[in-house]
Image (cartoon, grey):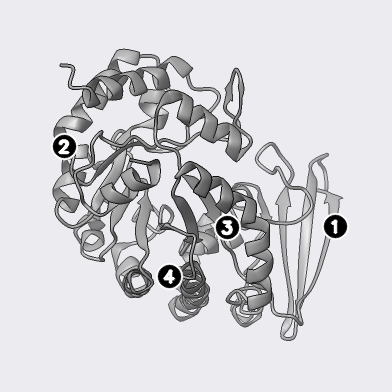
């Protein structure tokens, strides 16, 4: 079986032999002989380890044609810390956002709505209610012209996946995370409470872009859709906000993805404990992530919630175990994962990307124990 067949089979709830193991490496990881800053290097490392590689890609949004964008840098008063500013001129007024330059910001030419923008925020994009109307010009569903450019840019990546029998995993949406990237976590949470109608209006703009991305993904070459949900759990928002704002849109996205013939999974990390049963009933093919050591959701609790409803792609705590100093604890956890989840509808994974500051022997130990299990060794 190819990696595509193993991963897709497990997401369909099938019993796949041997047990799939799909882990992912941070671009800052340094392993002799492998350039993990590139897809080719990360894939070669996974192949060398014997794990199941996959090809990730993303799809974004379009800007309204009447938006005018400018960027500039300046120093923050009283410090030597450079600030990157970006302005979007819309037909309904101007929006600005600023981030501090630091090790988290790799791209110093424009503001990207990702973790880097949130962790380095200097000024939020959305500052008042009037900004909501302006924001819709920045959150336009992808146009055919932009899709064609995206398709041309991804052509080599699609060919790379096809030649090697690897599944293409498209992150089609980030949900409420995009609002955190635009205005920071604290402002986003307070905005949800202070202006619930405006907050839901923004969520709907994001949802419409995500539905468009699902439609485009259904045209071919994408195997699996990923919906990031790590920042819309209850360590940010209360369950009522999830139920009112996220749940109906997630259900619509899953139904639409299945109508396109696509597998779809939901990535969560912590804060999901009050929502497990709700998430299990949405209809995702697989739930990925989960952090058993830094949350109140054990592997057993996770499996009990999703068993028979969605496959699980989870396993080893990256920050606690792979980042720790006890390889034997890693080995025991791999075996415990196999005992808890079995072989049906399960992909052994890690809870986050493997970083350069983690002892590499821990990852090697994880892979070694997985190989022992799949070979039937006690």
Q: Residue at x 20, y 49 (%)?
A: 14
Quickly name the residue at label 4. Answer: 193
Mark 4: secondary structure: helix
Say left or right for 374 vs 54.
left
| Viewer-closest of 321 and 16 | 16
Q: Mark 3 or mark 4, which is nearer the start of the sequence?
A: 3
**Cα gap from disc 4 to disc 3, whole angstroms:** 18 Å
Which marked residue is nearer to the observer: mark 4 or mark 1? 1
| Viewer-closest of 109 and 372 | 372
Quickly name the residue at label 3. Answer: 181
Say left or right for 305 vs 208.
left
Quickly name the residue at label 2. Answer: 342
Circle 4/circle 3 CB separation < 8 Å: no
Count up the numbered dots: 4
Mark 1: secondary structure: strand
Query: How far across and how far down the image is residue 106, in percent?
Result: 70, 42
Which marked residue is nearer to the observer: mark 4 or mark 3? 3
Say left or right for 199 vs 309.
right
Neighbor class of circle 4 (other Cα within 10 Å; few <14, some 14-19, many 20+) is some
Q: Mark 2 or mark 4, which is nearer the start of the sequence?
A: 4
């Amino acid at each position: 079986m190819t990696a595509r067949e193993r991963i897709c089979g497990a997401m369909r709830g099938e019993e796949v032999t041997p047990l799939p193991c799909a882990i992912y490496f941070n671009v800052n990881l340094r392993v002799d002989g492998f350039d993990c800053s590139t897809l080719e290097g990360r894939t070669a490392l996974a192949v060398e380890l014997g794990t199941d590689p996959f090809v990730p890609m993303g799809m974004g949004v379009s800007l309204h044609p009447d938006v005018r964008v400018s960027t500039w840098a300046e120093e923050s008063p009283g410090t030597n810390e450079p600030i990157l500013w970006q302005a979007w001129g819309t037909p309904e007024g101007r929006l600005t956002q600023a981030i501090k330059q630091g090790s988290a910001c790799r791209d110093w030419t424009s503001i990207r709505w990702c973790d880097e923008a949130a962790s380095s925020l200097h000024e939020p994009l959305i500052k008042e209610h009037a900004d909501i109307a302006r924001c819709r010009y920045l959150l336009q569903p992808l146009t055919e012209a932009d899709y064609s450019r995206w398709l041309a840019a991804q052509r080599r990546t699609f060919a790379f996946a096809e030649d090697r029998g690897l599944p293409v995993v498209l992150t089609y949406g980030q949900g409420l995370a995009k609002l955190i990237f635009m205005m920071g976590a604290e402002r986003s949470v307070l905005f949800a409470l202070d202006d619930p109608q405006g907050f839901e209006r923004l969520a709907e703009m994001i949802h419409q872009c995500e539905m468009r991305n699902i439609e485009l993904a259904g045209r071919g070459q994408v195997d699996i859709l990923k919906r990031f949900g790590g920042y819309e759990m209850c360590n940010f928002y209360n369950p009522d906000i999830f139920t009112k704002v996220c749940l109906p849109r997630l259900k619509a996205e899953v139904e639409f993805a299945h109508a396109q013939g696509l597998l779809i999974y939901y990535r969560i990390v912590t804060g999901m404990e009050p929502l497990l049963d709700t998430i299990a009933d949405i209809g995702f093919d697989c739930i990925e992530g989960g952090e058993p050591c830094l949350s109140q959701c054990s592997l057993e609790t996770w499996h009990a919630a999703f068993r028979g409803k969605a496959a699980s792609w989870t396993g080893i705590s990256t920050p606690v175990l792979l980042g720790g100093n006890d390889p034997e604890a890693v080995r025991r956890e791999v075996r415990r994962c196999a005992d808890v989840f079995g072989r049906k509808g399960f992909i052994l994974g890690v809870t986050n990307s493997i970083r350069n500051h983690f002892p590499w022997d821990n990852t090697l130990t994880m892979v070694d124990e997985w190989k022992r299990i799949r070979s039937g060794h006690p």
